[in-house]
Amino acid sequence: MRVSDGMSALVLIIGPGHTLRQAARLMAGRGCGAAVVLDTDGAGYGILTERDVLLALAAGKDPDVEIAADHLTRDLVFADPEWSLDTAADAMLRGGFRHLVVTEGGIVAGVLSMRDVVRCWNQQRVSA
């Protein structure tokens, strides 16, 4: 199976100025654990995850003041839709993260989570 088989093509994209509360509400509303952050001023793509929000809150940060730009991960590993799920899982394990931004031709095509990988592997096992 490939990344394209498991990724979510519906991607939540927010701006770097969104507050953590706004980002959390949008993620909760979409039922997703990560938002791709697009900085159109040149910083490119980043990702803000539920873990990033949780760590900020645990550190006593105000979710109505803190913005996504100050809590996101900028050093992303981008996945190709044609990668195998094994390759994607290896990248996640090596990097210690649970989401990969999937790009095709430099454009965000989807997000693949560790949960997506496990779901696909389970479906493959059941159908075999």
Image: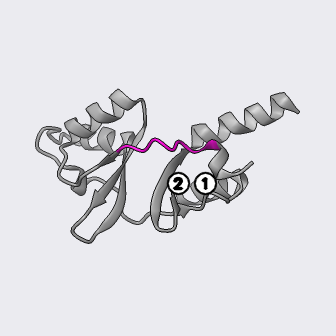
Q: Residue at x 21, y 68 (%)?
A: 41
Viewer-closest of 1 and 52: 1
**Residue 49, x across and y down, in percent:** 38, 45
The tally of labels here is 2
- Numbered label attached to residue 96: 2
Residue 8 appearing in the image: yes
Q: Residue at x 37, y 39 (%)?
A: 50
Q: Quadrant of residue 60?
A: top left
Mark 1, Cα crowd under 10 Å, few <14 / some 14-19 / many 20+, is: few
Disc 1 residue type (three-letter):
Leu
Secondary structure, mark 1, is helix
- Which quadrant is home to the C terminus? top right
Question: What secondary structure predominates along the stretch shown in magenta?
Answer: loop
**Residue 118, x across and y down, in percent:** 67, 37
Q: Which residues are magenta?
A: 6-12
Q: Residue at x 34, y 27 (%)?
A: 29
Cβ atoms at labels 2 and 1 below 8 Å apart: yes
- Numbered label attached to residue 93: 1
Q: Residue furthest bottom?
A: 42
**Residue 113, x across and y down, in percent:** 54, 44
Relative to 84, say whether 61 is above or below.
above
